[in-house]
Image: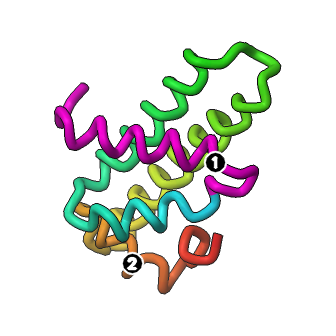
C-alpha cells in the first residue's frame, strides 16, 4: 500500500464510516478533507477505492455491508471527477484542502 501506515489509517477510517450507520458514508469525504487537509488529492480517491475493495473482500455478495462498498466506489468516482473538473477550470487540486474552494462552485460533498 502506497503511503504506508498513514494511508492505512485513512483506509481504516473510511471503512469504519462506510460500514457505520446506513448514512455514515454521507459526510465521509467532508470528514476526510477536514482530518487530512494536506493529503494529496489522489490519495483520497485511493483511500476510498481501497476501503471499498476491502469491504468487498470481507463480506459476501448479498451482505448488507456490500452497500458500504458501493458507496465507497461511488464517492471515489465522484471525487475523481471533481478533481478533474477542478483541473479543467484552473482551480488548485493538489491537496484535500483544495476541495473547499471547489465546494463554493459545486457543493455536492459539502452538503451531502
Identify whether 63 is placed above or below 104: above
For residue 20, the mark is 1
Q: Is residue 82 magenta?
A: no
Query: In this rendering, would 23 be left or right of 45?
Result: right
Q: CA distance from mark 2 to mark 1?
A: 25 Å
**Principal SS element in the magenta part?**
helix
Question: Few, some or many C-alpha atoms within 10 Å of disc 1 (few <14, some 14-19, many ≥20)?
Answer: few
Query: Looking at this view, is 6 or 2 the one in front?
Result: 6
Residue 11 picture quarter: top left
Height in image: 54 above or below 47?
A: above
Magenta span contains residue 14: yes
Q: Comparing marks 2 and 1, which lies closer to the viewer?
A: 1
Q: Residues within 10 Å of mark 2 (few under 14, many from 20)?
A: some
Q: Which stretch appears magenta?
A: 1-25
**Which color mode does the image show?**
rainbow
| Secondary element at image label 2 | helix
Relative height, residue 90 to residue 48 (above, below):
below
Name the residue beneath numbered marker 2.
Answer: 100
Amino acid at each position: 500500500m502506497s503511503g504506508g501506515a498513514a494511508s492505512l489509517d485513512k483506509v481504516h477510517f473510511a471503512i469504519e464510516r462506510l460500514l457505520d450507520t446506513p448514512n455514515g458514508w454521507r459526510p465521509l469525504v467532508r470528514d476526510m478533507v477536514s482530518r487530512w487537509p494536506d493529503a494529496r488529492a489522489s490519495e483520497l480517491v485511493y483511500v476510498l477505492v481501497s476501503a471499498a475493495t476491502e469491504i468487498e473482500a470481507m463480506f459476501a455478495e448479498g451482505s448488507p455491508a456490500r452497500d458500504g462498498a458501493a458507496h465507497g466506489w461511488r464517492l471515489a468516482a465522484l471525487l475523481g471527477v471533481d478533481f478533474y473538473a477542478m483541473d479543467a477550470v484552473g482551480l488548485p487540486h493538489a491537496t484535500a484542502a483544495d476541495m473547499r474552494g471547489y465546494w463554493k462552485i459545486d457543493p455536492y460533498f459539502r452538503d451531502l
